[in-house]
């Protein structure tokens, strides 16, 4: 169909590269478009968003020229494939496919072979679709990806967008200073971040960039969506523990010294509660550490139980808070926001 259109198109003066219509860059083939006439609406929203978020120096410029310049820019430290840049052009995060982890740091000297062999770096058309981002292994990778996005945004987006992204980055840096969540929690955290970046875009379409900027206030531990995701994760872990059936510890003939006996008291915590406690590596959070009673470790800063860790979690399960209130006089003032 495209070839027939090409053969029968009216002849015009050949356009220079800089005059190429932005529609040509983002236009899909007929096979990619649903039967409903939605193409114009999609383009309209893309232009609306880009005009609202663009760096002043890029306004009015040819889209492909902007993307190719960004691909080679000094502030681009991630694998700037055409599909990722095309999605970044109008903040297509979240359900639109772009992820914070697409901005993970790219080590050219190590990964250049992957780039040349597996990625088409010159085709900016829709036929070159982006691949899902690799999930983070740890919180440090999320912090680093946010740093890269902030740096990239300075030359690609306006001040309002940069400030919004920086707010998210600062939240993650603060969180990482107090916790080391496991890989599954990090993946959940990236999903939540992507949803906030996507919400920013949707509010530009629905209202304006001033309304979208208010989404930055949602980068908090008490955000409703984050709490729902966290609670869902804990519920799944509890369900997995229950499904595995009851387990009975093997009897021990060893004599317990006072310190060992004290550590064993931790087993009085129901296993369902232990299963939902936030973890730092393979160690569960110490509930005493968060409480007014404090942890009774052998030395300051060391937990009474070698299987527990001292850190401030992203969120505190309701059952854990109830246990702390009942057994340890409630949360200490430093953790009252949990």
Image: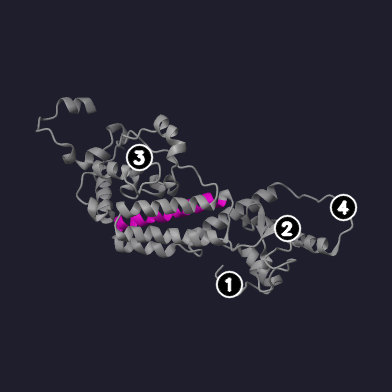
Secondary structure beneath disc 1?
Answer: helix
Q: According to the image, label 1 marks what residue?
A: 334
Up/down of 156 relative to 84, above or below: below
The magenta stretch spans which residues?
A: 185-207
Counting the numbered discs, the total is: 4
Please give the residue where the numbered disc 3 appears in the rendered image: 83
Q: CA distance from mark 1 to mark 2?
A: 23 Å
Q: Nearer the viewer, mark 1 or mark 4?
A: 1
Identify the element where label 4 is drawn.
loop
Tell me residue 169's x, y (percent).
Answer: 44, 58
Q: Is residue 131 above or below residue 254?
A: above
Q: Residues within 10 Å of mark 3 (few under 14, many from 20)?
A: many
Q: Earlier in the sequence, mark 4 or mark 2?
A: 4
The numbered mark, 1 or 4, whose residue comes first in the sequence reads 4
Q: Is residue 161 left or right of residue 338?
A: left
Numbered tag placed on residue 306 in the rendering = 2
User: Quick one: quadrant of the N terminus?
Assistant: top left
């Amino acid at each position: 169909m495209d070839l027939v259109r090409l053969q029968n198109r009216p002849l015009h003066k050949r356009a220079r590269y800089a005059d190429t219509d932005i529609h040509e860059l983002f236009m899909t083939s007929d096979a990619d478009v649903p039967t409903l006439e939605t193409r114009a609406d999609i383009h309209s929203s893309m232009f609306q968003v880009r005009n609202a978020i663009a760096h002043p120096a890029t306004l009015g410029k040819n889209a492909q020229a902007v993307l190719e310049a960004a691909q080679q820019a000094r502030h681009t430290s991630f694998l700037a494939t055409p599909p990722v840049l095309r999605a970044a052009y109008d903040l297509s995060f979240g359900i639109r496919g772009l992820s914070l982890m697409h901005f993970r740091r790219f080590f050219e000297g190590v990964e250049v072979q992957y780039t040349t062999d597996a990625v088409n770096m010159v085709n900016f058309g829709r036929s070159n679709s982006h691949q899902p981002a690799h999930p983070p292994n740890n919180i440090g990778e999320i912090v680093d990806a946010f740093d890269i996005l902030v740096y990239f945004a300075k030359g690609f987006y306006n001040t309002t967008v940069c400030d919004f992204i920086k707010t998210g980055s600062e939240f993650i840096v603060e969180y990482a200073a107090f916790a080391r969540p496991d890989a599954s929690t990090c993946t959940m955290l990236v999903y939540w971040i992507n949803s906030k970046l996507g919400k920013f875009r949707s509010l530009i379409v629905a209202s304006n960039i001033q309304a979208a900027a208010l989404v930055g206030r949602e980068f908090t531990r008490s955000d409703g969506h984050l709490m729902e995701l966290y609670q869902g994760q804990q519920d799944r872990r509890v369900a997995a523990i229950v499904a595995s059936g009851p387990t009975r510890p093997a009897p021990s003939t060893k004599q317990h010294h006072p310190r060992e006996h004290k550590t064993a008291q931790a087993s009085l915590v129901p296993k369902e509660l232990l299963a939902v406690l936030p973890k730092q590596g393979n160690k569960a959070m110490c509930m005493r550490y968060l409480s007014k009673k404090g942890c009774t470790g052998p030395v300051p800063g060391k937990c009474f139980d070698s299987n527990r860790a001292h850190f401030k979690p992203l969120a505190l399960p309701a059952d854990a808070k109830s246990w702390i209130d009942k057994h340890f006089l409630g949360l200490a003032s430093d953790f009252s926001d949990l």
